[in-house]
Image: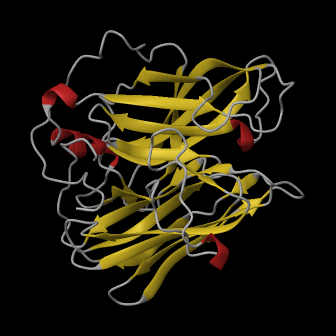
Amino acid sequence: MGAGTISRSGLFTMRQPHPVWPILLAGIGLVLGGCAGSHVGGGRTKVIDLGPLRIDRVFRSMEGPSERVRFDYSDVDWVTGFRTEVLDIQTGERLSEEFFCHGQLQIDNQTRLLVTATGISEIAFPEGFGLPLRQILSGVPQEKRKVSLFGMVLNNHHPEMDRLTKIRIYIDYLREEDLKEPGAIKRLYKVGLPITVAVSSPGSKGNPESAGEEFHLRGTHSAHWMVPPGKQIQNKIYSHIVPVDSTVHFGVAHLHNFGVYMRLTDLTDGKLLWQTDVVNQPGRAQIAQIPAYRSGTGFPLYKDHEYEIEAMYENLLDQPVDAMASMYLYYHPLGDERISYPDAPP
């Protein structure tokens, strides 16, 4: 299976937090209110701070200060939203998204259920949809049925900076008691589709002169590579990306600076399903936003179709830049099947 993280469900048993990670007691708030749908009661929000995280020099992607904490999900049945922001601890000022590398809600088997990053700091499912956290965890082996929150800061452009920051995470959620009737909310499950490259890859789909070039990995991770000056298009083909026929109702794409777009094509039908184009800050090669896909109607994913993800970079510098490209789709099974993630991703 292309994504390799979706499988069957099991039984739910609550476990105690792991002793080596902080427990979320201080720095956690609870907000009640809002409305998640016509058949759903008032929404709830947990507020969690990670830090302090000092930004005192340039930190490239995956290099910045970070923190991981244990998340108590004992009262969280459905997650309907996930938002992140970087704040100056002294002033409370919200900093630009350029200082946010990524955040995630992760199961102990390394499955990342919710991921935000530069330009995609908010996941907001359509009204009437949610990620069934408790149900998903019920299918995870008991020893891996714990959840953590992670956040990392970033600094590409300001070598003289010295600020003490924190990452604030907002988790919008519902309890079963908030649902006014059965089936009031539709289940969404995540599939992650990263582009990976090998050092000996035959070349990009971009400029002809790049044909035959070798891709240099950033470190040893095949999902992080270096883009030489100029344009480069990378792609990857997937099959069996969902276990059952489904519809996608929310999607985000993660790219680094100099990313131009990312798209998803159904190769079996020959249809372009979704493309998101990077919005940069005015006059700067700095991502401001990577627009998300959000729809109550959605688009189809078929378990027996073949799909291609494609990403374009245009490096305007005279030296290589680091890159990655991942697409995260949240889908609803057409038969309302219950999906879980018992095994670690490949």
Q: Is residue 78 left or right of residue 315?
A: left
- Residue 89: give x, y in percent of width and height: 73, 19
Q: Which of 95/26 is in front?
A: 95
Q: Residue furthest top?
A: 19
For the point 80% across and 55% down, the residue is: 317
Which of the 4 image quadrants contains residue 236?
bottom left
- Could you say which is closer to the camera, residue 37 or residue 327? 327
65 relative to 281 in the view: left or right = left
Q: Taking 339 as reference, is 344 above or below it?
A: above
Q: Position of residue 131 (x, y in %)?
A: 35, 51
Quadrant the N terminus occupies: bottom left
Q: Residue at x 68, y 50 (%)?
A: 321
- Residue 46 in the image: x percent, y percent? 49, 32
User: Which quadrant of the figure has residue 307?
Assistant: bottom left
**In this orientation, does residue 78 appear?**
yes
Residue 125: percent from left, percent from top = 47, 58
Whether residue 119 sits left or right of residue 36 in the image: it is: right
Task: Give me the residue at 55% from left, 50% from top.
Answer: 216
Residue nearer the viewer, 186 or 148 = 148
Residue farthest along the right direction in this orientation: 283
Answer with left or right where residue 280 lies relative to residue 127. right
Residue drawn at the location 79% of the way across and 29% of the way down? 93
